[in-house]
């Protein structure tokens, strides 16, 4: 791919509705499209990841993938859809080829995306795709079908499917459809599995996964920068490196705040609507009357994002810090950074609150209290902290199960659902989102203080 700033419409690609992404397209891609296409596809992949983590059933996943694709990847111009699909895949391949952990996640999500997109195709389209993909399988001849049709009918009836003489079967090495063999959904004879057309997705996905896995390793070994023009490397490197940790939701900047919170309500709000990471920082500030830099940044920008104005923020932090370091030292050493976060000092930037991804990827040291409790707390401390927030029983076990599997944001989502007795289908991706969603539920129940 060549990255350009041209406004010229990309050249159409002659490709089926699904692709094996064998080679990067020979296209000129506008710099802005390079990132935007990748972000839209990343929304799809992260939506799939959340659905899998929540244990959605295959039919639910199929509906989810269809909705995610239509929302993020559709376009009125079919050629543009095909371009966006292929370009976005190869951009994210550059992003996720760099480490084994990134490759593993991308491979799983792309495979699941392909699986459900393939399932949504018509039978005719699926057969056409198999031909165009040059998959090494041939349909069973009529003569061979007659020799095994009774056995095939028995298997079909055992899994609750009608035995249809018109069904097309493919004869493949059994190890290539391990999931069908494990669930006893195919007939096996002399090392070959007889796969009906309605289950051909398994063998197609096996081929797809193998090709993408090899391509990711190859892309990494060749270094992704070799795939683009030298003059674009400096501009693209920060984009590629940032995409794998990108937050895709609202930034909760000061200019977008629609409500304010007052100091008299802050303790009540902390108890009812702060996520665990911010609740912990708030409690430690009240206990120790001090937080190190990482904690001040994480909690301070969060409070800014939920609507605490600068004057109130200065009063809040001064009231706590003065108990330990004195008012004069606070004014000299700490007040500037608070004003700076609000864009009133230095470059006057409107700094935004930290997303879950940024908090999870932080590395707190001894004596620090920032970071993500689901990742950085010991199991004992996490259980105790969740218990204080009112999470117990089966809900607590479910949260800890997600933590053990490193689904930290989903663990936070389950905490939200347990505390509020309400589902959060979008998942928690930002502490300020947690607060906002909590307030939507609790506002009618909370009586104003007098």
Image (cartoon, helix red, strand yellow):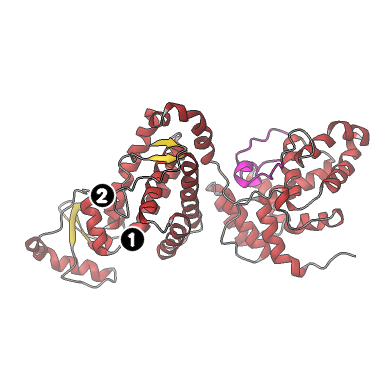
Residue 176, label in figure: 2
From the image, tell me which residue sits under label 1: 119
62 relative position to 407: left or right: left
Residue 398 horizontal/vertical position (percent): 57, 57
Residue lying at 86% horizontally and 46% vertically, measured from the top left: 311
Residue lying at 41% horizontally and 65% vertically, measured from the top left: 59
Question: Looking at the image, is mark 2 or mark 1 earlier in the sequence?
Answer: 1
Q: Which portion, as a residue range, is magenta?
A: 350-377
Q: Classify the position of the C terminus by image quarter.
A: bottom right
Residue nearest the observer in this picture, 210 or 132? 132
Residue 169 horizontal/vertical position (percent): 18, 61
Residue nearest the observer in this picture, 400 or 444? 444
Number of marks present in the image shown: 2
SS assignment for the magenta stretch, majority: loop
Quick check: is 368 in the magenta stretch?
yes
248 relative position to 20: left or right: right
As helix, strand or loop, the secondary structure at mark 1 comes to: helix
């Amino acid at each position: 791919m060549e990255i350009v700033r041209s406004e010229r419409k990309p050249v159409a690609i002659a490709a089926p509705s699904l692709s094996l992404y064998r080679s990067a397209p020979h296209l000129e891609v506008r710099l802005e499209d390079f990132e935007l296409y990748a972000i839209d596809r990343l929304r799809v992949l992260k939506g799939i990841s959340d659905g899998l983590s929540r244990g959605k059933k295959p039919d639910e996943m199929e509906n989810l993938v269809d909705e995610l694709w239509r929302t993020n990847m559709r376009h009125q111009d079919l050629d543009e859809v095909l371009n966006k699909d292929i370009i976005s895949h190869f951009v994210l391949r550059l992003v996720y080829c760099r480490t084994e952990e990134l490759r593993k996640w991308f491979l799983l999500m792309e495979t699941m995306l392909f699986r459900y997109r393939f399932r949504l195709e018509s039978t005719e389209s699926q057969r056409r795709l198999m031909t165009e993909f040059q998959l090494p399988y041939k349909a069973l001849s009529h003569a061979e079908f007659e020799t095994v049709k009774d056995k095939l009918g028995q298997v079909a009836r055992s899994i609750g499917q009608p035995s249809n003489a018109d069904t097309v079967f493919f004869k493949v090495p059994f190890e290539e459809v391990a999931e069908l063999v494990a669930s006893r959904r195919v007939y096996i004879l002399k090392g070959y599995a007889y796969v009906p057309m309605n289950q051909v997705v398994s063998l197609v996905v096996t081929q797809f996964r193998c090709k993408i896995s090899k391509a990711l390793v190859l892309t990494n070994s060749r270094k992704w920068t070799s795939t683009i023009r030298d003059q674009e490397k400096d501009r693209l490197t920060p984009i590629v490196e940032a995409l794998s940790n990108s937050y895709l939701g609202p930034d909760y900047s000061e200019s977008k705040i629609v409500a304010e919170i007052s100091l008299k309500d802050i303790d009540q709000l902390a108890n009812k609507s702060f996520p665990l990471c911010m609740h912990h920082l708030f409690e430690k500030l009240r206990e120790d009357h001090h937080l190190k830099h990482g904690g001040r940044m994480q909690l301070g920008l969060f409070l800014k994002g939920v609507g605490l104005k600068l004057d109130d923020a200065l009063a809040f932090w001064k009231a706590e810090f003065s108990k330990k370091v004195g008012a004069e030292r606070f004014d000299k050493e700490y007040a500037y950074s608070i004003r700076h976060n609000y864009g009133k000092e230095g470059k006057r930037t409107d700094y935004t609150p930290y997303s879950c991804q940024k908090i999870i990827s932080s590395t707190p040291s001894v004596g620090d209290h920032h970071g993500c409790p689901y990742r950085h707390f010991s199991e004992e401390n996490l259980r105790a902290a969740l218990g204080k927030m009112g999470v117990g029983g089966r809900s607590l076990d479910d949260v800890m199960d997600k933590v053990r599997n490193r689904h930290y944001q989903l663990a936070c989502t389950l905490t939200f659902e347990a505390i509020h007795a309400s589902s959060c289908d979008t998942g928690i991706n930002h502490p300020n989102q947690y607060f906002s969603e909590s307030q939507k539920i609790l506002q009618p129940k909370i009586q104003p203080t007098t």
